[in-house]
Amino acid sequence: MRLEQLKQIIKIQEQQSISKAASDLFISQPSLSVSVNNLEEELGLKLFERSNTGVIVTEQGKEILRLAENILILSDRMIGIMEGTKVSIRNLQMALPASFAKAIVPGLLRQFRDLYPEVNLHIHEASFYEIVDLMDKGIYSIGIISYRADLEYNFIRQLKEKDIAWELIPGGERLRLSLFISSKNPLAAKEWVSKSELRNMRMISYKEVYSKYSKDLERSFHKPVIVEDIELLKKLISNDFGYAIFPEILAYEDIYVESGMIKVIPIKELSEPSNVYILYSSKESLSFIERELLTIVNELITDKL
């Protein structure tokens, strides 16, 4: 296994095409295919499924690619140390929940790329549990999560056990949990709802959201529908297929909400405010560039809240 091969599979993932990746890497397509095949044989698993329209990363391949990105980050750090310069970072991995993506990612990318055009900032949309778990494994350099202020004690204890450091950005009204429901539904006319009113309705859950909030809700007569795509979730809600529970910030500049197709309503029993935490590893010091990234994220979140 060579670092060159890890760079190759990351490029294939970015382009979703072996031919396009080969062009970017200035090598022939057959040579790249042979290199990937050799790596797959060495690992004993398939990284990509080939098709006429391109390539798709396998489930095992997704984990290998996360590890490959982390290895390349560490490689860059070592090169910087050997060169006697500041830590040289060419790739940064950060993760945040879907509810924050639209609100801060566009501004974050613009500001960071203006400051460090040579650094590749990879932003991953992930669930709360995925972010904490993969930061514990060293996959992400920085994570952003929100957590209810009244449950902070257990959460902080979990971070300490995993050697994850944090910085707190106080939450606000836009981080209170709210009901996202179709304007066609009778509940859409209410100023607020009670959780008991949701018992006869179907919950549409984005990844782990149902398991996270189910303890706070009345037992529903319907099994939740689990989806992996946030846009599909909003389309289902707008068609009155069910409801979802998210921090209000998810409605930020959202076309479904702005057009009136989806209504956002406070839930009486879930009115506890949340805080926002920026996470990073406590096992090693942050580089100057990583500290700059934290500053930008902090300012953007504070501005949006």
Image: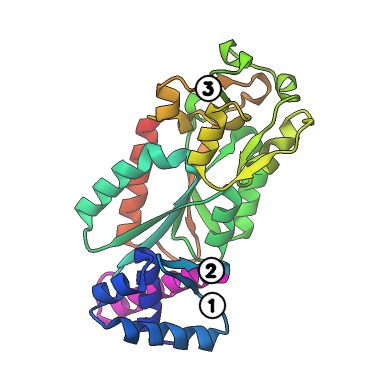
On screen, residue 198 above or below 52? above
| Pointers 3 and 1 in contact (C-beta within 8 Å) | no
Q: Which residues are magenta?
A: 60-87
Circle 3 packing at 10 Å, graded few (<14), some (14-19), many (20+), is many
Specify whether residue 236 is in view: yes
Q: Secondary structure at mark 1?
A: loop
Quadrant of the rendered image containing residue 8: bottom left
Cα distance, mark 3 to mark 1?
Answer: 43 Å
Q: Where does label 1 land, which residue? A: 46
Quadrant of the rendered image containing residue 7: bottom left
Could you tell me which residue is drawn at 34 percent across and 65 percent down?
15
Labels 3 and 1: the sequence-earlier one: 1
Please name which of the two marks, 3 or 2, marks the residue nearer to the observer.
2
How far from the left and from the top, in percent, is residue 280? 47, 56
Quadrant including the N terminus: bottom left
| Pointers 2 and 1 in contact (C-beta within 8 Å) | yes
Between 162 and 178, the one lying in front of the other is 178
Q: Which mark is residue 264?
A: 3
Quadrant including the C terminus: top left
How far from the left and from the top, in percent, is residue 180? 56, 27
Between 166 and 243, the one lying in front of the other is 243
In the rendered view, does 280 fall on the left or right side of 269? Answer: left
Between 172 and 65, the one lying in front of the other is 65
Could you tell me which residue is drawn at 68 percent across and 36 percent down?
213
In the rendered view, does 129 fall on the left or right side of 294? Answer: right
Q: Where does label 2 land, which residue? A: 58
Name the amino acid type tagged 2.
Thr
